Image (cartoon, rainbow, N blue to C red):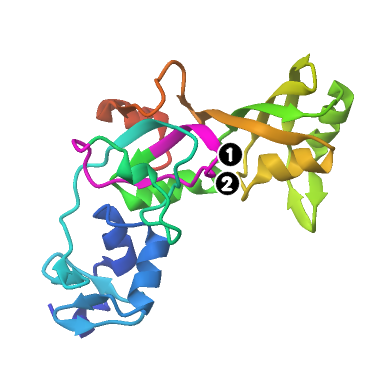
Amino acid sequence: MSTEKAAKEGERIAKVMARAGLCSRRDAEVWIQAGRVSVNGAIIDSPALNVGPDDCIEVDGKKLPKAQKTRLFLYHKPTGLVTSARDEMGRDTIFDHLPKSLPRVISVGRLDLTTEGLLLLTNDGELSRHLELPTTGWKRIYRVRAFGDVTQDRLDALRNGVTVDGIRYGKIDAHLESQKGANCWLIFTITEGKNREVRKVLESIGLKVNRLIRISYGPFELRELPEGEVIEVHPSELPKLIPGFFK
């Protein structure tokens, strides 16, 4: 199929790349604009292109792998690992420590270097994009240890949202578990997952986070999964757990 004909039918190339599990759709668009992608031997510089099954797509000179059946994994991320494929500072990434038996996967969102707990991994970039959208309304629940004192009344005020450094954060449910010496333990529930949201919001009310553990993401829970371990969600369960994606 010619590039001209592909532009009129098929699927957007970034979506096809994401389905192949090579990257997210957003990353695919960046790669295309950087001149790393070719279609039928011609380098493209815009993601505004549809491709079909007969088109030859190459990334960095290597043929795009065929899309595999969608899979989803739960991973207990330890602290000290970066959630990215490469780190310009040379730090270890989660992908340096995942079991070699896993297929090529990408993460659903990110956890900070010092944040631990549940991280979803998938071989489908479109699924990753879907699960990251705030419109899913999925709750992200964290168990937090923070330095400082706080009352439940102060935490209840966060239910109306809060603006920190010009950024508006939506409804937050926070519950005081215990106060032990100079530290308190909280259960912190958000639905947006903005960059460093938990830390920034708590800093705005005088608390300094010193341990942050994500214990659930939507219907998926960390439970007793050991640190550094990965388990797969059974494929037959995915349509029930993610009904908005599987049609």
Mark 1 crowdedness (10 Å alpha carbons): few <14, some 14-19, many ≥20: few
The answer to whether 93 is drawn above or below residue 117 in the figure is below
Q: Are marks 1 and 2 in contact (CB under 8 Å)?
A: yes
Q: Percent from the top left, x then y, of residue 204?
A: 82, 43
Q: x, y percentage for residue 150?
A: 85, 26
* Residue 43: % across, % down: 24, 83
**Kind of residue at badge 1:** Gly
What is the residue that sits farthest to the front in this orientation? 90
Using residue 86 as the reference point, say whether residue 52 is left or right of it.
left
Q: Is residue 160 magenta?
A: no
| Numbered circles on residues, count | 2
The image quadrant of residue 145 is top right
Residue holding disc 1? 137
Residue 131 placement, left or right of 163: left
192 displayed left or right of 9: right
Residue at the image position 55 percent from the left and 39 percent from the top: 114
Range of the magenta residues?
100-120
Mark 1 lies on a secondary structure that is loop
> Relative to residue 37, is residue 182 depicted above or below?
above
Q: Residue at x 61, y 32 (%)?
A: 212
User: Residue 165 got which mark?
Assistant: none
Q: Is residue 229 visible?
A: yes
| Residue identified by numbered label 2 | 134
Q: Mark 2 belongs to which amino acid? A: Pro
Q: Is residue 225 above or below residue 134?
A: above
On the question of residue 48 being in view, the answer is no
Measured in 3D between alpha carbons, the distance from the residue under mark 1 to the one under mark 2, in whole angstroms, is 6 Å
